[in-house]
Amino acid sequence: MTAAAKYLDGNFAPVAAEVTATDLEVTGAVPPGLAGRYIRTGPNPFAAQVDTYHWFAGDGMVHGVDLHGGRPRWYRNRWVRSPEASAHFDEPPVPREDGGWYAGSGNTNVFAHAGRILAVTEGSLPYELTGDLDTVATRNFGGPLPGGINAHPKFDPSTGEMHVMSYGFDNPALRYHVMDPAGELVSTVDIDLPAPVMLHDMGLTASRVVLFDLPVLFDLELALQGVALPFRWRPDNGARVGLLPRDGTASDAVWIDVEPCFVYHPLNAFDDGDRVVIDLVVHDHAFAEDGEPVSDRPRLERWTIDPRAREVLTETVDDRGTEFPRGDERLTGSRHRYGFTIGQSSVLDLGALGDDPRTAIRKHDLVGGTTVEMDLGPGCIASEMVFVPADSAAGEDDGWLMGYVYDATRGASDLVIIDAHDFGQPVATVHLPVRVPQGFHGNWIPDSALA
């Protein structure tokens, strides 16, 4: 099976229709304090070409479950109305503000800021969605944002600011943007680079921004051939991590060489005196063969970045193959203890179940140095799990993990809610009438975030 065909098979395969379902069966009990929507986005192409399709480039579709009063009120899935989607549905295009180096499809992340729900693909402007997941318009935060924004903003819990990166290819550079709590762009720092690299995410501490200059490079030859994701693994370009003061300029950045690798997703970062500690998932390579975006066994590591000694100390937290790290985002930029990831079940590592597809959810205690794993059972495949605190005063792991899990035995998906502290069986499973294809990122968006 080709790489393109692999991402059109099984639960990667797209669903064909937009659905609204209001009579949802629940096993267990939905925590009554949850009032909002869990929304996740991902690729769901209209008509993918098997020989050229790339999973990262599929048309964006958001999937949401509304929870209020201890019950689910609805499940909805909707294509984000990109120009292609509007044309596909023979609808007028949604209003567009200026910015981005392409239109994007909203297929990578969905989050809330300044009272708006926003779905974004890196390099484009985000699409604003209604609470019912309909597309309103693109937004540029007052701009200009010629490179759009990346799909992984960081939100400072003390200021309410949104911090996010973007990048460009014509003049290789990173751009560090800050949006205020009202959703207005207040600052941009341009940082020149030697080569046009992909930067998917960033780190944020109370005082600094963590930058990645890693050897996945834009390739013009591939772009001219019409390759959907024109990037190549170029370890000869070197690899480095940078620290930029949040109130600094490009000349204040300190760059430190690291071994060639690629990082899609940090868990969190914090200041430790002059040093910065960041927990992150590390891939040995990306886009190395046939456009494959990930390596075989990505690992959770802790990097301690010392700008004075110009060195990065690394230690492995979990080497069993893992991704999609999340934690308590009330601690963004501050010292944290816990993180949550998904990965191949250790049951499969024992070789006892053959090719049975299943994943597990892991809870990492970064202080105690332990990891516990919840196996989801045969044929169950998780997506990213999001932490939701039980209330504003709750402890770091006092709350819920939630995310979609595909159940191959019934050919449909569930919204699974897990007690993050006890980390036992799910407290509630909301059974959806359809599949939610494997996708990327999402968030719990409480009603309070849309006030």
Image (spheres, rainbow, N blue to C red):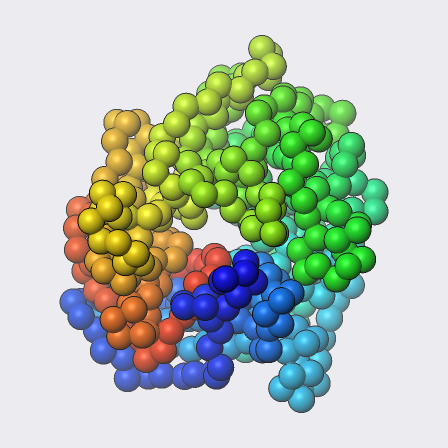
In front here: 225 or 392? Answer: 225
Q: Residue at x 42, y 40 (%)?
A: 297
In front here: 40 or 194? Answer: 194
Q: Could you tell whether 90 is left or right of 394 in the image?
A: right
In front here: 31 or 435? Answer: 435
Whether residue 318 is visible, yes or no, is yes
Whether residue 337 is visible, yes or no, is no
User: Could you say where residue 336 lies in the image, as x and y percent from the top left?
Assistant: 37, 33
- Give the farthest residue toward the right: 170
User: Could you say where residue 70 lies in the image, as x and y percent from the top left?
Assistant: 23, 70
User: Could you say where residue 181 lies in the image, as x and y percent from the top left?
Assistant: 58, 51
Q: Residue at x 79, y 40 (%)?
A: 172
Examine the rendered structure and indicate whether residue 231 appears above or below residue 336.
below
Q: Could you tell whether 332 is left or right of 199 in the image?
A: left
- Give the farthest residue toward the front: 1
User: Could you say where residue 324 lies in the image, as x and y percent from the top left?
Assistant: 43, 48
Examine the rendered structure and indicate whether residue 167 appears above or below residue 16.
above
Q: Could you tell whether 61 is left or right of 373 in the image?
A: right
Q: Residue at x 56, y 33 (%)?
A: 261
Q: Could you tell whether 292 is left or right of 22 in the image?
A: right
Q: Residue at x 36, y 54 (%)?
A: 385
Examine the rendered structure and indicate whether residue 271 appears above or below residue 365.
above
Specify the quadrant of the image occupied by residue 384. bottom left
- Give the farthest residue toward the top: 309
